Image (spheres, rainbow, N blue to C red):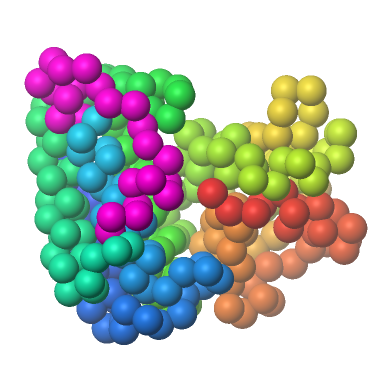
Amino acid sequence: MRTERNPSPSNNLAYEATAFLEALGDTAPDALTMCSLWRAHEVAAHLAAGALEIALNLEAYGEGRPIPVTTGFDEREMPFRAMDDPRLRVELQSNIGRVGKALDAVLSLDPNAVVPWTGRQMVVATFVTHLRSEFALHRFDLVGEDSTSTSLLCQPELTDHAVDVLGRALLARGAGSAPADFRAVLAAPGASQVTIVVDEGGPRLERNDTPLEPEVTGDPAARLLLLWGRHPADPRRLEAPGGADTLGVLRSLLAGY
């Protein structure tokens, strides 16, 4: 795994983007993926559409134009899903380059820039880690567990992003199944614990720097997969000392982004 990164935002996401594109190049468009309703084609469409959506937002911000309202997944992905696969793959690479250029332009002028995004305010620099997370996770969706997937997914900043930026979004889909008051600690060796909280403040993820008795333990990469509604191909990488009932609640809550 690469440990040093170039200060350019576009170079910072190039490692994960390249790893994803190489895996996609070895994957047939109709191949099934870890996303149960998506083939490789739909995964590529999702990433192409997301990169373009971020680029359009940042280009408008950088040029002083009104920032467009963020469109929903289905609306923005539909044109890409409809493309023939060779064209889609070209568009994906083009949009990755475009969003990298937009990130470089905005952050070179204002490293602390903030833009409206999906009804909230998003620190532009966090888009870099978000894209890195998307490429790493969707690479896993294509090829499963290998040494590259493990090295990508165990990077602590990807878990930090899941907690600090997506701490409510990752629980939104499964929130309706949550009990009224619930807490569960997810631990990984050498990393801060993550606590899933459901209370009057709503379902969310929180970082826990004071060690508590965990309900689920596993290596950092396996834990990140669980937070994103996935599971490692080798289920023994995760253990649930908190018991089956707590595990059932966690599975329902962590239903994916």
Q: How many marks?
A: 0
* Residue at 17% from the left image edge and 25% from the top image edge: 60
Tell me if 82 is positioned left or right of 9 in this view.
right
Residue 155 in view of the camera: yes
Tell me if 5 is positioned left or right of 135 in this view.
left
Residue 201 versus residue 227 in the image, above or below? above
Q: Position of residue 233 (x, y in %)?
A: 58, 78
Tell me if 63 is positioned left or right of 179 in this view.
left
Instruction: Give residue 219's quadrant in the image.
Output: bottom right
Q: Position of residue 35 (x, y in %)?
A: 51, 68
Tell me if 165 is positioned left or right of 52 in this view.
right
Instruction: Give residue 246's quadrant in the image.
Output: bottom right
Q: Position of residue 243 (x, y in %)?
A: 88, 61
146 and 45: which one is in front?
45
Residue 107 in view of the camera: no
Q: Position of residue 135 (x, y in %)?
A: 34, 59
Instruction: Give residue 153's quadrant in the image.
Output: bottom left
197 and 6: which one is in front?
197
* Residue at 19% from the left image edge and 52% from the top image edge: 96
63 and 160: which one is in front?
63
Residue 238 versus residue 121 in the image, above or below? below
Quadrant of the snapshot with the N terminus:
bottom left
- Magenta run includes residue 71: yes
* Residue at 35% from the left image edge and 55% from the top image edge: 78
* Residue at 32% from the left image edge and 38% from the top image edge: 127
Start and end of the magenta stretch?
58-80
- Magenta run includes residue 38: no
146 and 52: which one is in front?
52
Residue 239 versus residue 48 in the image, above or below? below
